[in-house]
Image (cartoon, helix red, strand yellow):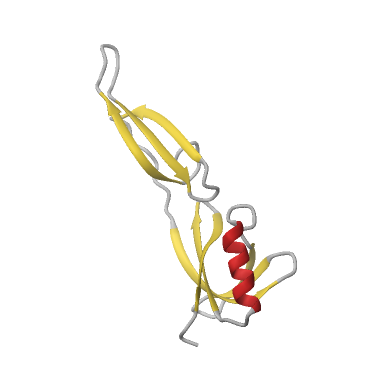
Amino acid sequence: MIKERPCKIVEVTTSKPGKHGHAKANIVAVDIFNGKKMEDCTPSSHNMNVPIVTRNEYLLIDVTDDGYLTMMDDNNNEKNDLKLPEKEDLELCTKIRDMFDSGKNLMIGVISACGMELVNTVKEDTTA
């Protein structure tokens, strides 16, 4: 967690302890929800919070005109509170719409952490 946002660490560099302080860890990370680069500098002896990230797959049932997805999980529970990732990933958004409009059965991958969720993958469901 950097600045209270769940991130994926891409680089860590450390510096030696100085005359008046601890060794520092310089962390470069990417926010998993919006892709923004984040940086943090913290004493290497301190603990850091780690987000619990889960990945789920849902069967896509419908895409509304305003971009909301109607999906179903393995237990036949309906989920309809997520939108297409238009701002975060326009290419994925277009791919989902095109594949759905062509009549394919799709599995939608969703990551969730810290009370936030994001559609991040799509693949054709070949089991149906």
| Residue 95 x/y as whole percent | 59, 67
Name, please, the residue furthest toward the bottom.
128
Q: Tell me where residue 63 sits by quadrant.
A: bottom right
Name, please, the residue furthest toward the right.
65
**Looking at the rendering, in which quadrant would you find the N terminus?**
top left
Q: Residue at x 55, y 57 (%)?
A: 117
Q: Residue at x 64, y 52 (%)?
A: 87
Q: Tell me where residue 9 sits by quadrant.
A: top left
| Residue 33 x/y as whole percent | 53, 50
- Work out whether residue 61 can be spotted: no
In the image, residue 27 above or below residue 125: above
| Residue 82 x/y as whole percent | 62, 63
In the image, residue 72 above or below residue 54: below
**104 with respect to 53 (left or right):** right
Q: How many numbered circles are shown?
A: 0
**30 with respect to 92 (left or right):** left
Name, please, the residue furthest toward the top.
19
| Residue 122 x/y as whole percent | 52, 69
- Work out whether residue 105 can be spotted: yes
